[in-house]
Image (spheres, rainbow, N blue to C red):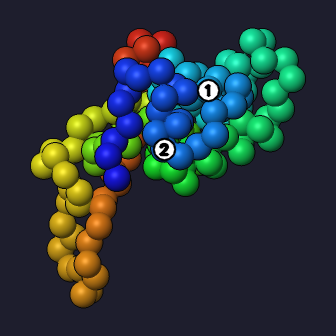
Amino acid sequence: MTAPDVHAPAADVLRAAGLRVTEPRVAVYDALRRSPHASADAVFAAIAEGLPSTSIQSVYNALGDFAEAGLVRRIEPAGRSMLFELRVDDNHHHLVCSVCGAVEDVDCVVGHAPCLQPGESHGFTLQSAEVTFWGVCPACAVAES
Ligand SMILES: [Zn+2]
Ligand SMILES: [Zn+2]
């Protein structure tokens, strides 16, 4: 699968991925461009004003279709809402603030999956490794001190 062109209009990206171009899908895709690592609720909040007829369900549907088409990646920090991002073409990892939930991308150290080798693979063929680094973001560190 070739990675979608992040600068192409959303409609072109959807079409290239074999998806029918609809207004909600375009709005959801553009919302993810503006805010990477957005939850479905955040996407809905971002597009609701411009598309008052959109339901949260249609946002979930669009995100599900994107995931199936390889356009979005889902990340699930423990205890937080599932987040969606358009950066699918590498094996990058995440820093998550344990106070406010802010998420930052960090590049994979070796540049390709799997980033890490376990000490014992139990005969598994390894495909990927996802690392979540937990900590306190600079803004929360300032607020706490
Ligand atoms: Zn924070
Ligand atoms: Zn990311």
* Mark 1 beta carbon near ligand 2 (under 8 Å): no
Question: Viewed as shown, does residue 128 lie left or right of 98?
Answer: left
Q: Residues within 10 Å of mark 2 (few under 14, many from 20)?
A: some
**Front-lying residue, 1 or 84:** 1
- Quadrant housing residue 60: top right
Report if residue 35 is visible in the image.
no
Q: Give the residue at the far bottom of this rendering.
A: 123
The percent position of residue 132, horizontal first and vertical second, equals 38, 46
Question: Viewed as shown, does residue 114 lie left or right of 102?
Answer: left
Residue at position x 47%, y 21% from top? 9
Question: N-terminal of the two: label 2 or label 1?
Answer: 2
Tag shown at residue 17: 2
**Front-lying residue, 99 or 56:** 56
Q: Look at the picture and state if 64 lies above or below 34.
A: below
The percent position of residue 115, horizontal first and vertical second, equals 21, 55
- What kind of residue is marked 1? Val
Q: Which residue is mark 1?
A: 26
Residue at position x 81%, y 27% from top? 54
The percent position of residue 42, horizontal first and vertical second, equals 66, 26
- What kind of residue is marked 2? Ala
Label 1, secondary structure: give it: helix
**Front-lying residue, 45 or 118:** 45
Q: Residues within 10 Å of mark 1 (few under 14, many from 20)?
A: some
Q: Look at the picture and state if 131 lies above or below 9.
A: below
Q: Look at the picture and state if 56 lies above or below 64.
A: above
